Image (tube, rainbow, N blue to C red):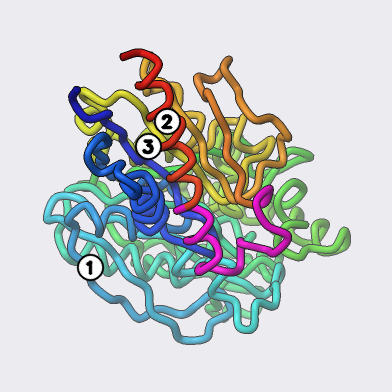
Amino acid sequence: MSPFRILLAPDKFKGSLSALEVAGWLESGLISDGGKRTIYCRSLPLADGGDGSVQAVLEAGFRPFTVKVPGPTGIPAATIVALDGFTAVVEAATTVGLQMLPGGRLAPLASSSNGFGEAVRAAHGRGPRRIVLALGGSATTDGGAGMLSGLGAQFFNGSGEVFVPCGGNLKDITRIDLVGLCDLSGVDLIAANDVQNPLLGPTGTAAVYGPQKGAAPSDVVILEEGLANLVNRLDEAGLPGTSCALSPGAGSAGGLGYAALLLGARMVSGADFFMDLLGFEQALKDCDLVITGEGKMDDQTLSGKLPLVVARRSMPVPVIAVVGHNALEKDRMPEYNIQQIYSLSNMTDQDSAIDSALSARLLTAVGRQISQTLERARGVRR
């Protein structure tokens, strides 16, 4: 009997394991106890445009280069940009992301996306024909003004002084000079994102995502007023500030999606884009089962996060999801082509999300369970 072919296509388990590590520990369990003779595993670590996107493409063969940038609060940091000659991938999460905040202290008014703009500029200097902006995980709510500053735009206050914009000082912008803005017109600019919010209003980036980044109700008011001022000043500078602010996705990543749209970027589904970039369809060929997963499965998963996109695109091949924690409290979702959900949090009283060694052991145990289930099913079919 030919081996049972499994495609391992997980996202990272945030705070615990990379997507490659998740796939590796699952495989170690699947092929243990004799499974190596009956199961063949193919690994395709995935990402959805958030933290781990650069790592996923590096594991697929892209080359890294290091760029020194200001972090979200201006403290010098370094980020990795991935390049394969044609495409560069720049990631907000590891440039101006929440994980880059000193001591993990949230800074909703003081954080800026300036470093992300500098990283994009450095990537552009390497001559790629396509630049992918992985927008997830930012610590900022500055409408992407910091990003534009990092790309060469100048922001002036009422005293005529140039300053680096952040969420709290957007209200101080009186004029924007775009003369020095990096020319990206010859590049296919891709904004990888799965958020549809506009920039402003009750469903905008400050109101919806500001509190997640530490913004108190009074901070949200400051951010909203500042973003509205930014839109007006961009209109005056000759960019389509108002029309782009209304576009779906403009509110993604604290408004980085807005800045990307101003620069002519195409907004795409992060999960679908990275699956295509990494060759999901080819990897799926001849497979009998797909195992995907993420750190936490919740309502956001149902809005189009990577496990559901994997399940949809795997049809009619069945899919199993392995997650760190399943907040949906379902053990299967056949309506989404997910036949079984394994949750690590159901296997321990400890917090595996912050314990990579524990996560590794539990993933190996899940791999063994799946292998044994497959063996029993094959035995019945013989």
> What is the secondary structure assignment of the residue under circle 1?
strand
In the image, is residue 350 part of the stretch drawn in magenta? yes
Which residue is pictured at 50% across the width and 69% down the height?
357
- Residue of label 1: 64
Q: How many marks?
A: 3
Distance CA(mark 1)–CA(mark 3)? 24 Å
* Dominant SS type (magenta): helix
- Residue of label 2: 310
Which residue is pictured at 43% across the width and 45% down the height?
367
Distance CA(mark 3)–CA(mark 2)? 22 Å
- Residue of label 3: 266
**Residue 70 appears left or right of 289:** right
Which residue is pictured at 32% across the width and 70% down the height?
80
At label 3, the amino acid type is: Arg
**Location of residue 286 with respect to 16 vertically, above or below:** above
In the image, is residue 51 part of the stretch drawn in magenta? no
Residue 125 picture quarter: bottom left
Where residue 99 sits: x, y (%)? Answer: 56, 70
Which residue is pictured at 47% across the width and 46% down the height?
239
Callout 3 crowding tier (Cα within 10 Å): few <14, some 14–19, many ≥20: some
**Residue 330 appears left or right of 304:** right
